[in-house]
Image (cartoon, rainbow, N blue to C red):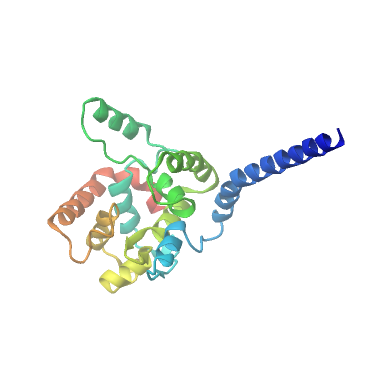
């Protein structure tokens, strides 16, 4: 009898600590989201993965005020046209992608800049349902705790622009030999154009596809106008 009571006590204690550990794991990302609202992320999971694989790391944090406004505008035009309007999820874009699926067409990516930021700073790069679920859970928290400009600042400082190259400043100096504050509209469009696959495409040796995409981005910037307001203030 005493032995069975001890076993039950051990099991109760184990369950209690298991619940505490699970709650801590759930709370940790939220704590980091709150922390990163005011503290710049030192590394991202992707950076750590690349470092462990023996790759270099070129990362130079730069406040948004010291990044040419051409770059956030180009990134919004390339990745998330309604970034300044939505609250983390672009429901119009998601509906459009569902319509494409129902019509038998291949859907495009519908991740917003906020969703990409959540993935970049806290999650792993592989595409799987669990990561997407966590991304969806973290996205509204970022929108709630951060300003739009903070989201842009973090995104532009941790995004991968090439092998071992992270952030606008490192990319601008590596590819164009200038500070991010001195990027012109053409260079900004080229950097934004390679973001979907920066390890395959180069902004300094752009393929015909990248040149075309950069041209589309510049044209779209002119069309978006007031929809870029959060990148300009």
Furthest toward the bottom, the residue is 177
Q: Residue at x 28, y 31 (%)?
A: 96
Q: Is residue 58 left or right of residue 121?
A: left
Residue 189 location, quadrant = bottom left
Q: Residue at x 78, y 38 (%)?
A: 7
Q: Residue at x 35, y 54 (%)?
A: 72
Residue 197 in percent (x, y) is at: 28, 54
Residue 62 location, quadrant = bottom left
Residue 211 location, quadrant = bottom left
Residue 21 in percent (x, y) is at: 66, 45
User: Depth check: 44 or 230 in front?
Assistant: 44
Furthest toward the right, the residue is 2
Q: How many marks?
A: 0
Q: Residue at x 26, y 29 (%)?
A: 101
User: Depth check: 8 or 32 in front?
Assistant: 8
Instruction: Note whether 159 is above or below 177 in the view shown.
Output: above
> In what quadrant of the picture does the N terminus appear?
top right
Instruction: Note whether 133 is above or below 41 in the view shown.
Output: above
User: Depth check: 15 or 219 in front?
Assistant: 15
């Amino acid at each position: 009898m005493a032995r069975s009571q001890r076993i039950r006590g051990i099991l109760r204690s184990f369950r209690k600590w298991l619940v505490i550990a699970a709650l801590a794991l759930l709370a940790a990302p939220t704590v980091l989201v709150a922390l990163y609202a005011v503290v710049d992320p030192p590394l991202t999971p992707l950076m750590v993965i690349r470092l462990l694989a023996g790759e270099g790391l070129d990362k130079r944090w730069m406040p948004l005020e010291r990044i040419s406004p051409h770059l956030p505008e180009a990134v919004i035009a390339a990745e998330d046209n309604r970034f300044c309007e939505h609250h983390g999820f672009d429901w119009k874009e998601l509906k459009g992608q569902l319509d494409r699926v129902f019509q038998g067409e291949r859907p495009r990516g519908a991740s917003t800049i906020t969703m990409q930021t959540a993935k970049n700073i806290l999650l792993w790069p592989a595409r799987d349902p669990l990561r997407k679920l966590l991304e969806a859970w973290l996205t509204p928290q970022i929108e709630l705790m951060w300003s739009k400009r903070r989201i842009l600042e973090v995104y532009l400082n941790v995004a991968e622009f090439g092998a071992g190259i992270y952030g606008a400043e490192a990319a601008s100096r590596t590819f164009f030999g200038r500070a991010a504050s001195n990027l012109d509209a053409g260079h900004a469009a080229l950097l934004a154009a390679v973001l979907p696959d920066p390890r395959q495409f180069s902004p300094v040796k752009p393929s015909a596809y990248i040149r075309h995409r950069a041209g589309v981005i510049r044209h779209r910037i002119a069309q978006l106008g007031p929809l870029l307001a959060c990148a300009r203030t």
